[in-house]
Image: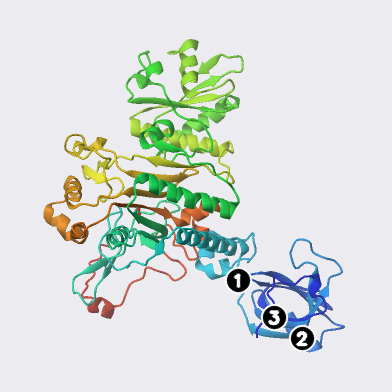
């Protein structure tokens, strides 16, 4: 037996018992005649104690040789400490060591393995196994386990069955590029890794599984924006014989359960917001509603004066920044520079101070009098002491810009509190989305999403206006889940694919298996998938998902620890009948 107890277990009540511990040397304090060692394992830290009077000479010498991160086994007696350490759970005791075995040595680690480390991101990723020894990372992984466990328990309790679906499949249309895997046995052919198990879970519904879930890896080859991973985990779910309302209730139940179970917070019924309203009020389909600062559209009150910038704009829209009138001129100039950065892309920003005496002072006083500005305040909900920030231009762009400004200001004002949970459903997304680059419509969710009842005909005349039976679950400004009621009959699926620009042959080649299945009694069905990494990060009060993933990839999609991706040798290429045609 390597150990009788863990390093987090011993208390004063264990005094005088003989114990054996095993773990890593976190630190050594050598005072010559006395040596103290902090011994660490997953469960905590226990102080080992050696003294000249009671410890044999050879063990003293062995202890003196120990370095950081050596792996040792120590036998000894639990002793109540004279001076206790209230900062650690084992702080009342120490172990007077009578036997010491060095199980393994260690090089000096490249960064300190403590809560606050001196290691930069890259170094920590390269030596991720050392990083995982640190409490913050270790705790994050344990936290993730707890969330996953709570998900499994809840969904199992609701009658869901976890079914595994294959990873070596054919392209799934979730809007990203596929990662592909060459097939050795089928010359010139490739598998695609699933962007999600979408088609399989629908086939499970055709197969009569009724309620499916899976905690599953998904793979999307996208240019990695900050805090995205090329492989990530979904809680993927599907139900048969359901309407949208059933799905919303079921997964609102799951989310509420998680927030209660993990964070101890009770959340009221989730508000629901139409996609169009989310865009109008927050400029964003995943609004953070922990705070107000809703958009006020100012076209009616700000256009038709002599200010051409506004007159020529498709949308003039503002927000009221609480207490913003206290900003100095310099601070406001900085804010204007902030919205003009290329990442945000605004051409400028008009502002209006709401003075405490009820008067207004704007950057465009030449064109607007006090009555005009009072209307701005009314529309944006600005109070005395606030600052109104106004952007103008093309609707979609301006909304995105003002949304970014709203989030930035809320962050600065401390309105995005990690311990507050503000979930909401955003519903009735457009079915199709115009893609400027390819000049055609794409499915906004995916091609299996059903249009709202009675809207199928609109596809021919006003495709951009058709709404879908699609919904997103948003938490604190993040999309944590999204899903839809699916098409479950062949004719509708054919119409949808036609509108997405698939010829009949293409549709058959890519989705024939699903369309065929629809001809064998496919039940009405729908589902949702949650991004587990993000959900865990938010429940854990963090915005970055990396620390909740044991072995994450960097922004270039590399695993710097194992150094992947990497070239493969000629033989392997040969076996796969592949030849490289490298451009650089
Ligand atoms: N497969 C979808 C996705 O990954 C989720 C769903 O529609 O259930 O976003």
Residue 109 is marked as: 1
Q: Earlier in the sequence, mark 1 or mark 3?
A: 3
Residue nearest the observer in this picture, 115 or 560:
115
Residue nearest the observer in this picture, 253 or 544:
253
Q: Residue at x 81, y 87 (%)?
A: 56
Q: Dot 2 corresponds to which residue?
A: 59
Q: Is residue 398 left or right of residue 382?
A: left
* Vertical relation: 367 (above or below) 1: above
Q: Earlier in the sequence, mark 2 or mark 3?
A: 3
The answer to which quarter of the image holds residue 160 is bottom left
Using the numbered discs, state the Cα–Cα distance from disc 2 to disc 3 in whole angstroms.
20 Å
* Vertical relation: 545 (above or below) 369: below
Label 1 sits on a secondary structure element that is: loop
Of circles 1 and 3, which is in front? 3
- Using the rendered image of the protein, determine whether residue 542 is visible from the camera's viewpoint: no
Where's residue 209, x and y in %? 33, 62
Q: Dot 3 corresponds to which residue?
A: 4
Crowd class of label 3 (few under 14; some 14 to 19; many from 20; radius 10 Å): few
Residue nearest the observer in this picture, 260 or 109:
260
The answer to which quarter of the image holds residue 53 is bottom right
Residue nearest the observer in this picture, 186 or 32:
186
Where's residue 482, x and y in %? 38, 49
Using the numbered discs, state the Cα–Cα distance from disc 1 to disc 3 in whole angstroms.
28 Å
Label 2 sits on a secondary structure element that is: helix
Q: Residue at x 20, y 34 (%)?
A: 462
Q: Quadrant of the C terminus?
A: bottom left
Q: Earlier in the sequence, mark 2 or mark 1?
A: 2
Residue 496 is marked as: none
- Using the rendered image of the protein, determine whether residue 519 is visible from the camera's viewpoint: yes
Where's residue 517, x and y in %? 21, 60
Q: Residue at x 44, y 60 (%)?
A: 554
């Amino acid at each position: 037996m390597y150990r009788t107890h863990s390093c987090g277990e011993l208390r004063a009540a264990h005094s005088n018992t003989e114990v054996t511990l095993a773990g890593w040397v976190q630190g050594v304090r050598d005072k010559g005649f006395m040596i103290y060692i902090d011994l660490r394992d997953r469960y905590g830290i226990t102080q080992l104690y050696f003294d000249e009077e009671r410890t044999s000479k050879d063990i003293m010498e062995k202890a003196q040789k120990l370095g950081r991160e050596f792996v040792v086994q120590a036998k000894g007696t639990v002793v109540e400490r004279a001076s206790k350490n209230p900062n650690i759970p084992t702080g009342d005791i120490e172990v007077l060591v009578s036997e010491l075995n060095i199980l393994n040595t260690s090089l000096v680690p490249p960064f300190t393995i403590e809560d606050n480390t001196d290691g930069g991101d890259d170094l920590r990723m390269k030596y991720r196994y050392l990083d995982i020894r640190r409490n913050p990372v270790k705790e994050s992984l344990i936290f993730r386990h707890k969330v996953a466990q709570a998900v499994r328990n809840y969904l199992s309790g609701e009658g869901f069955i976890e079914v595994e679906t294959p990873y070596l499949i054919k392209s799934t249309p979730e809007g990203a590029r596929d990662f592909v895997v060459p097939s050795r046995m089928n010359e010139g052919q490739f598998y695609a890794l699933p962007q999600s198990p979408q088609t399989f879970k629908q086939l499970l519904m055709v197969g009569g599984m009724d309620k499916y879930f899976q905690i599953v890896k998904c793979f999307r080859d996208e240019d990695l924006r900050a805090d995205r991973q090329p492989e990530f985990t979904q809680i993927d779910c599907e139900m048969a014989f359901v309407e949208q309302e059933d799905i919303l209730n079921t997964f609102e139940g799951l989310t509420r359960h998680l927030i209660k179970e993990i964070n101890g917070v009770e959340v009221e019924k989730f508000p629901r917001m139409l996609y169009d309203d989310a865009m109008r009020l927050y400029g964003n389909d995943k609004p953070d509603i922990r705070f107000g600062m809703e958009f006020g559209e100012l076209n009616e009150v700000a256009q038709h004066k002599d200010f051409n910038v506004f007159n020529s704009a498709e949308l003039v829209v503002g927000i009221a920044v609480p207490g913003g009138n206290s900003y100095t001129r310099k601070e406001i100039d900085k804010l204007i520079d902030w919205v003009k950065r290329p990442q945000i892309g605004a051409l400028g920003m008009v502002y209006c101070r709401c003075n405490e005496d009820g008067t207004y002072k704007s950057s465009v006083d030449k064109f607007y009098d006090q009555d005009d500005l009072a209307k701005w305040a009314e529309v944006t909900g600005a109070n005395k002491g606030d600052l109104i920030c106004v952007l103008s231009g093309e609707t979609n762009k301006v909304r995105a810009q003002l949304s970014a400004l709203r989030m930035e200001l809320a962050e600065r004002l401390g309105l995005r509190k990690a311990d507050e949970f503000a979930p909401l459903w955003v519903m009735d997304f457009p079915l199709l989305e115009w893609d400027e680059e390819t000049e055609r419509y794409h499915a906004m969710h995916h091609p299996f999403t059903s249009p709202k009842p009675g809207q199928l005909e609109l596809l021919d005349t006003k495709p951009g206006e058709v709404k879908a039976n699609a919904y997103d679950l948003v938490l604190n400004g993040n999309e944590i889940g999204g899903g839809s009621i699916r098409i479950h009959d062949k004719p509708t699926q054919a119409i949808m694919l036609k509108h997405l620009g698939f010829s009949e042959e293409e549709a058959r080649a890519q989705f024939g298996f699903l369309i065929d299945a629809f001809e064998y009694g496919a039940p009405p069905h729908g589902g949702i998938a949650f991004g587990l990494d993000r959900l865990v990060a938010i429940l854990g009060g963090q915005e970055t998902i990396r620390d909740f993933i044991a072995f994450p990839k960097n922004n270039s999609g590399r695993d710097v620890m194992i150094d992947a991706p990497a070239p493969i040798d000629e033989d392997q290429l040969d076996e796969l009948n592949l030849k490289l045609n490298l451009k650089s």
